[in-house]
Amino acid sequence: MSDSSEKSLKELIAICDEICATISRYNVGAVLCLGTTLKTLLHQELAQFAIYLEDTDGVITAEEQSLIHDYLNLTFTVSEMRTIRAQLNDPHSSFGTTRPKALKYFILADAGKKIPHDPYKSQNAQILVDTYKAFGQLILSVQETMDEKQVARMSQYTQMLDNFLKEYGVFYTNQFKLIRPKQKTSKKPVADIKNAESVEKILEELNSLVGLESVKSDIASLVDLIRVQKMREEKGMKSADISKHMVFFGNPGTGKTTVARMLSKIYRGLGVLSGGQLVEVDRGGLVCGYVGQTAIKTQEVIDKSIDGVLFIDEAYTLNVGKSENDFGQEAVDTLLKAMEDNRDRLVVIVAGYTGPMEQFIDSNPGLKSRFNKYIRFDDYTAEELIQILEGMCKAKDYTLSPEARDVAVKYFEGRIESKAEDFANAREARNFLEKAITNHATRVVKLKDPDDTVLSTLVADDLVNITAASIC
């Protein structure tokens, strides 16, 4: 396979020009009937792509003009670029959703094996797509500020190109890795006052959660460590390499996803991640049942998670199958490579039951080396579950009568003492409330003109018949 991901943009364009000449030589897809050379068509379409990305700020700069000239040897006046821009943004234009004409010939060359002794091993179309990605990245990098609309256009357009490769069976997993352009400054950006206030607000929200005392302490320590390291960086001092990947272990319903979502926002506020989005998946979101498809599916999830947090629930299921027809290990291998390739732009949190998660991490030296921070989520006590239940009631404009509260306490105490495998902590409280509200409705609907207190108060009779089986 060609290693186009490591080549410079000018090298990629030169390779594409060479491929154009080869495709023309063998007249792939009757390319000689185009009415122009394939190379000319390719350069014109790349220029349109550049103008399409540049359009969002409404300004055409000399630097943007020079990029098109320097890399594509095409010269456009400002007036010509504005005309092209207007055509591309016409409501009837399909530019953003239609593949480039040149790509068709590259795909035909690959899918039909039309080039004898092909030096690029039928990856010509992949190289062209890599070139689009690299050129788009260059266009974005010259902007003084990163325009979200430009990033969205870039992402949507290149995803459309990738989809065409998949459709024609010429998609490969060694695709070009988009690297966010470096800031034009000698120092790394630090979190500003607004972000600092945001972090404090999220920490307050975290601390307001019921229970989870050890989790709160661990997160607070991590925040302090990151802040001090940034202070040291600002003063030109060496800073420690902090691994931000984590293992969350504990039983269901103990707040792992909630804390992961908060942590992603904290990382963004501290300037660790520029996006801060949380992408949540389980085994089904990563693994396919066919050879080669799992790596593609996992990579797509990783791409969505770049500059944010990838949260993998029940991660231990990725290595439960050891047969040749199980592709969980392929997902793990793809994930480990991405964690290394994007170590400053991707945080991965794996979560699940304590025992299986320990076995999962120990099963692979790569996993063990990348995950060195473990956070335990303990089960809630009966009193903590009551506090959670009361909070849920308040959010839905309900209250528990004193007698109903006593019934709920006994219920949760019994569930905890039974050590039932299906006990789900906070989820148990949520399901318990939903059943109680249903019972309440069945009782109240028979009353004539119930007042606000009756409509909002859950009494003991609404709770007494609730069992574990009825809320599962």
Image (cartoon, grey):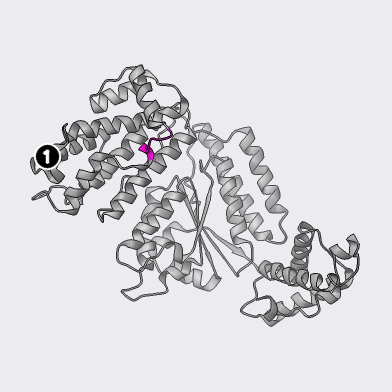
x then y, percent, for residue 22: 11, 41
Horizontally, is 117 left or right of 3 in the view?
left
**Residue 105, above or below 457:** above
Image position of 437 with respect to 18: above or below: below
What residue is rendered at 36% in x and 55% in y? 337
Say whether residue 95 is magenta: yes
Under mark 1, the amino acid is: Ser
Q: Position of residue 418 (x, y in %)?
A: 69, 82
Q: Position of residue 308 (x, y in %)?
A: 50, 48
Q: Nearer the viewer, residue 392 or 437?
A: 437
Occupied quadrant, residue 254:
bottom right
The residue under label 1 is 24
Pick the front one: 177 or 237: 177
Q: Quadrant of the C terminus?
A: bottom right
Against 72, is 109 above or below?
A: below
Identify the magenta region.
91-96
Is there any visible trace of residue 180 in the rendered image? yes
